[in-house]
Amino acid sequence: PHLRVRTNVMACVMRIRNVSSFAIHKFFQERHFQYVHTPILTSNDCEGAGECFTVSTLMGQADPDYSQDFFGAKSMLTVSGQLNVETYAAGLTNVYTFGPTFRAENSNTTRHLAEFWMVEPEVWFIDQKGLMDLAEDFLKYCISHVLKECQADLLYLDQYHQRAEEERPKDDDSRRNEGSLVERLMQIVSQPFGRVTYTEAIEILKKELQEGKATFVESNLQWGMDMASEHERYLAEQVFKKPVIVTDYPAEIKSFYMKQSECGKTVAGMDILVPTIGEIIGGSVREDNFDKLVALAKSKGMTDKDVESLSWYTDLRKYGSAPHGGFGLGFERLLLLCTGMLNIRDVIPFPRYPGNISC
């Protein structure tokens, strides 16, 4: 990675990365959000997946006693700044964090990294519709800024992708972009995003499958399943033919902090799906009732000890709360969208993935 920036393609990508970073701050600062630096070292796994990098000075011990470690407890590299930034939203109203996050997933795909950057705003006094509107405005703003400031780079990348497509073997059925890069970006910013509930999305996919219009590797489409990337991309690319916001996901497949509907079956969550990539933004209205939040955490398998370790988070409800919500954008996935690159390792200066930490 230390030499590839000398190529024209990588230089274009990195200039777009620079401009996109500025656009993110510009969007939130113009709307009077406060930028909060959330910690990289943490004691909590925000996603509840357990796929964290452990940070310890107790090297070589088979069963380490973390109470004797540097921090006196088990510590990890953060998987998300969301829970931390939410504490500051309670005092500053509208905040955001933008920084590196880490996942210890043994995943060698074109869409995953072990170290990547996340943008995570948190907004007080907002409902689900307001959150969707904010996320759509944010995505369009960043793309518009790139279109305005990076015209030469986009033109060069457009020509690069066209040449690559012409040289591509006809029997190569791997993921590809459709049409001109600039045209795709212009279409995103010039029209409203589609909006559909999870229940409606599953029914659409079922119908497409039954009518022979679609084929999926995961063809057993059932309400309650976690949609795969192939399903997300099909909705954005073939059904809506533009970005689409999917809302009201089943509570069983979402995190404990998402506000549940009155029936308890769904949550006030929303994901934005875009062509060629799938999910690019995920967010929700948060549960603002203390008793409900604790009950939801335990229903997800958290022990009393686990809940106690998050007392700093549940206290936000105990000492006064209000309707609030937020979302997370994977910055490198935004760059995949803006540059047309097909591998996420090509939009970050020093990619970290299983088996590679060189340079």
Image (cartoon, rainbow, N blue to C red):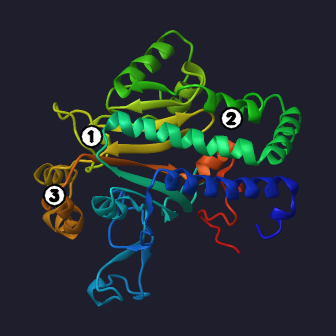
| x then y, percent, for residue 10 | 80, 56
Q: Is residue 207 above or below residue 139?
A: above
| Helix, strand or loop for disc 1 | helix
3 or 2: tag closer to the N-terminus: 2
Extreme-left residue of the structure: 291
Asked if one can make out residue 321 in the rendered structure from this viewpoint, the answer is yes
Determine whether label 3 and label 2 are within 8 Å by CB: no
Q: Earlier in the sequence, mark 1 or mark 2?
A: 2
Q: Residues within 10 Å of mark 2 (few under 14, many from 20)?
A: some
> How many angstroms separate mark 1 from mark 3 (CA)?
27 Å
Whether label 1 touches label 3, CB < 8 Å: no
Identify which residue is drawn at 44% across, 25% down. 195
What residue does disc 3 label?
320
Q: To which quarter of the image does residue 214 belong? A: top right
Numbered tag placed on residue 47 in the rendering: none
Q: Secondary structure at mark 3?
A: loop
Q: In the rendered image, which residue does mark 2 sit on? A: 185
- Identity, as a three-letter code, of the amino acid under mark 3: Gly
Distance Cα–Cα, label 3 vs label 2 = 42 Å
Callout in the foreground (3, 2): 3
Image position of 64 with respect to 120: above or below: below
Quadrant containing the N terminus is bottom right
Q: CA distance from mark 1 to mark 2?
A: 35 Å
Residue 154: where, in percent of width, then height? 79, 43
Name the residue beneath numbered marker 1.
252
Quarter of the figure with residue 254: top left
Residue 109 x/y as whole percent: 61, 50
